Image: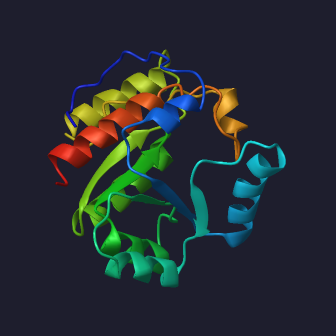
Amino acid sequence: MTVKPSCKQTIKQSDNQAIKQSTMPTIRRMVPNPRRKHHASSVGEQAGDPLPFDVLPANMATLAYLGGAPATKEWSIIDAPPQGPLLDKTLAVADFVILPTSDSPMDLQQAWDTLDRARHATRAALLPVRVEANTNAWAQTLATLEQTDTARFDTFIAKRQPIKTSLGMNPKQLYEYRELADELTRIAKEELA
């Protein structure tokens, strides 16, 4: 992870074959709302294209299990709220924290607050999402992140309608998420080993 942005935003393999061929470990995603979990996994199943990973409820019990589980090659991605006891427990068991944020000043302020809390527990970095690269807001955000030497991913996720509407479905295109997966894999090998 570096401070300078990687502006190349190329589309890699365009189907879920990229996920299946990935060198990434097995993924298990945990979400804070069980109803959302049911919806997220059942949409793809109903369409005959189930997600290639489990979606489980993120609660104190599942997080306690993760905290006591021996290290594996499996990745657990925990979708936690930006505050409260579930975030505290998530920070306690996490090896790395990804803080998604938009270029909105309000979102950035909350992300910085959470980043400060996360850094007391583990490694953490901001992930710019819903980025509109040719706007003043993004230019100002990028300049601010560089001036403050904020830990962030080189990859940023562009604002796209197909991403907004893809809940529970296997992606047909990975867009910048392929680059993010590569960056996470590199971080895991270099920093978390």
Q: Is residue 89 visible?
A: yes
Q: How is the image coloured?
A: rainbow
Residue positioned most to the front:
21
Q: Is residue 156 visible?
A: no
Residue positioned most to the right:
46
x, y percent for residue 88: 39, 76
x, y percent for residue 188: 25, 48
As drawn, 73 above or below 5: below
Image side of residue 189 versus residue 137, left or right: left
x, y percent for residue 49: 73, 42
x, y percent for residue 123: 23, 57
Count of numbered tags:
0
Give me the residue at 34% from left, 53% from top: 112
Image side of residue 58 versus residue 72, left or right: right
Image side of residue 48 versus residue 104, left or right: right
As drawn, 66 above or below 138: below
Give me the residue at 73% from left, 37% from top: 165
In the rendered image, the quadrant that contains the N terminus is top left
Near-viewer residue (73 or 146): 73
In the rendered image, the quadrant that contains the C terminus is bottom left
Give me the residue at 59% from left, 32% from top: 16
Near-viewer residue (128 or 135): 128
